[in-house]
Amino acid sequence: MQTAYHAESIVDAQIAKDALEHEGIPAFITGAALIGGIGRLPVRDVIRVLVPDVALESALKVLAEVFPDRAPARARSPGGEPAWALRKRHAKPA
């Protein structure tokens, strides 16, 4: 299993999972049970959507269409932070 999507919330994860399954890609949500521990756990990357290894490339294409403003799961900074989070933090005001 490979991480195809790092979700911001359980709703976000479910949208990703539903989109993948609609395209015939099996998807699984992991980390949802940890939501109750927020405050004691680091909140970053708690909820992830996993797909089989062979379906990762297809899943990333589907998710890029569903979430065009988010970077794929593999686009991570060296510190492990999602690339989209870095773009938001370092974006210049318009």
Image (cartoon, helix red, strand yellow):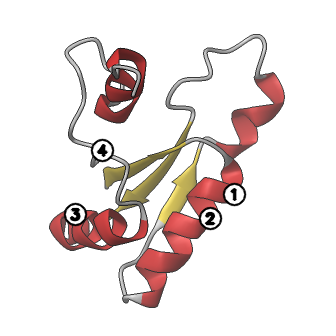
Cα–Cα gap, marks 2 and 1: 5 Å
The image's mark for residue 56 is 3
Look at label 4 and name its amino acid: Ala
User: Looking at the rendering, in which quadrant would you find the C terminus?
Assistant: top left
Q: Do the residues labelled 2 and 1 touch (CB within 8 Å)?
A: yes
Q: Residue 54, how many percent across, how many down?
A: 17, 69
- Return the residue at label 4: 73
- Label 4 sits on a secondary structure element that is loop
- Return the residue at label 1: 11
Residue drawn at x 41%, y 18% as measured from the top left = 89
Q: Do the residues labelled 3 and 4 touch (CB within 8 Å)?
A: no
Look at label 1 and name its amino acid: Val
- Return the residue at label 2: 14
Q: Are marks 3 and 1 in contact (CB under 8 Å)?
A: no
Residue drawn at x 75%, y 10% as measured from the top left = 40
Q: Residue 2, how many percent across, how many down?
A: 29, 52
Residue drawn at x 31%, y 55% as measured from the top left = 1
- Label 1 sits on a secondary structure element that is helix
Cα–Cα gap, marks 3 and 2: 17 Å
Look at label 3 and name its amino acid: Leu
* Among numbered discs 2 and 4, the one appearing first in the sequence: 2
Cα–Cα gap, marks 3 and 4: 10 Å
Closer to us: mark 3 or mark 2? 2
